[in-house]
Amino acid sequence: MRTRIRNASRNDRKLAQLCAQIQEVLSFALGDSSDDRLHDLVVHSVTPAPDGARLLVTVMATNESDMSSLEETHGALESARPWLRRQVAAEISRKRTPDLAFCVLPHWDGEP
């Protein structure tokens, strides 16, 4: 039983490290993107969805956005997905590159 718990916590730690590494890679990649719609995005989080084979990348717009521009940004991310996966594959040491799913959050300045 302890071995399972130890292995589970080790796997959770490894998955958390992978998510942090991919968050950093994607932050740089979005800044280097040739698509202006992606330049000003901030990677808010990268989480397993539901495991390390597929990751949910949550990004936040840095400027005021209406719903149509958020949908446009999501479309731009979907179009850039193959390129972003290649950027991830070049930087991580894994047999398979995880699939990426995207969620775009509107700008929030912390004011209610």
Image (spheres, rainbow, N blue to C red):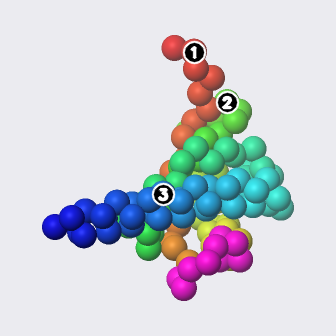
Q: Is residue 19 left or right of residue 84?
A: left
Report the residue marked by disc 3: 16
Q: Residue at x 75, y 44 (%)?
A: 40
Q: Position of residue 112 (x, y in %)?
A: 51, 14
Q: Is residue 61 left or right of residue 96?
A: right
Q: Is residue 91 left or right of residue 53?
A: right
CB within 8 Å, label 3 to label 1? no
View extreme (top): residue: 112
Q: CA distance from mark 3 to mark 1?
A: 30 Å
User: Which residue occupies the foreground of this view, 104 or 70?
Assistant: 104
Figure check: 42 above or below 13: above
Report the residue marked by disc 2: 64
Q: Residue at x 67, y 30 (%)?
A: 64
Q: Which residues are magenta?
A: 88-96
What kind of residue is marked 2? Glu
Q: CA distance from mark 2 to mark 3?
A: 31 Å
Q: Quadrant of the N terminus?
A: bottom left
Report the residue marked by disc 1: 111
Neighbours of disc 1 within 10 Å: few (<14), some (14-19), many (20+)? few
How many numbered marks, from 0 up? 3
Mark nearer the N terminus (2 vs 3): 3
Q: Position of residue 111 (x, y in %)?
A: 57, 15
